[in-house]
Amino acid sequence: MVLLDKKAKVKGLSLLLKLLVFSATLYFIYIKVVKNDNFISLSEIFFHFSRKEFLLLALVVMLMPLNWLLESLKWKKLLKDIETITLVTSLKAVWAGLTINNWIPNRMAEFLGRMLFLKKENRNQSVSCTLTGGLAQFSVTIIWGVFSIFLVYSGLFSKSYLLLAVVISVFLLVFYFNLNALNFITKRFRFFEKYTNVLTFYNIRQLTGILIISSIRYFVYLLQYFLILKTYSINIGFVEGISGVSVVFLIQALLPSVTLTEIGTRGAAVLFVFERFGAAPVNLLLSAYTLWVINIIIPTLFGVFFILKIKTK
């Protein structure tokens, strides 16, 4: 009974934190957009789209499948030692995982959707595969983000900040390349061993390959974001744009989120980072939410279809 009470309190505090984050980010957006004297209406933006801007938007949409194919390739390689699947099956599993993950706090249930497409005996091991891929992507996001802060806010940080960035990066990489140590620890607990045994299969070469795929996917996402900023007439150089987007990704990675709170955090993050470049707040918000629809909402709809289809079978 005491344990249940503690769990209820933790869940309550977690929900309260998410509501506070959501409320704070919405208020921040309201102040920056609605109270802004230079407010631009949506009609002014859409009806003045040029041919170039439509082409940029089309390019962003075309990069979406590449983004998710890279994630699917990573998942396929992570599963190599426990089950062989096709790239198409991997893509279905990844989108199914995305669908379920959108409704679970802090994106902690991706494995539930992915394991639906595996043999029953391999599903436990797939949890560690998913977490390994997620850690690789998280590490890339944090590493590039902490170094990009120095570029975006060069006047606010001393050079000693670079040393901190190096320490953070080294710590993440050391932890990532020593994941098999987790299996050594969990051997003492038979319940966890069935989930973590797969970690012993990963060597330095395999983990490096997963990290490279994660990095390529990260830069595809960076390019998409930069192009969508240009689509909405945000005048910013390539280096400043890419660095700023890296900081936006860092903020999004560190804030607690579910689908509801993510609506607020995505908008607040892009306003916080890019408003200093003189960009119109409405254009910045449209950039963030358009990319969210392209990269998250559309694949989520496909994920719903694949989940329903496999349940029918």
Image (tube, rainbow, N blue to C red):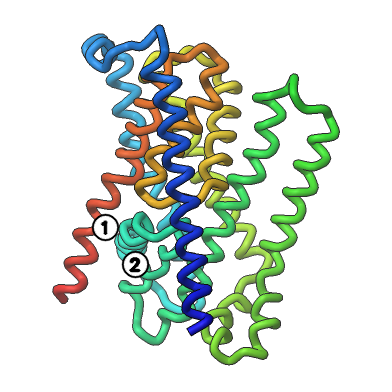
Residue indicated by mark 2: 113
| Image quadrant where residue 116 sits | bottom left
- Distance between the Cα atoms at labels 2 and 1? 9 Å
Residue at the limit of the structure toward the left, as seen here: 312
Looking at the image, which is closer to me, 269 or 84?
269
Q: Amino acid at mark 2?
A: Gly
Residue at point 40%, 87% (across, down): 121
Residue at point 31%, 35% (across, down): 61
Q: Is residue 305 above or below residue 23?
A: below
Q: Is residue 238 above or below residue 79?
A: above
Looking at the image, which is closer to me, 288 or 225?
288
Residue at point 35%, 23% (across, down): 56
Q: Amino acid at mark 1?
A: Gly
> Residue 137's x, y, as percent?
55, 52
Looking at the image, which is closer to me, 162 or 256?
256
Residue indicated by mark 1: 303
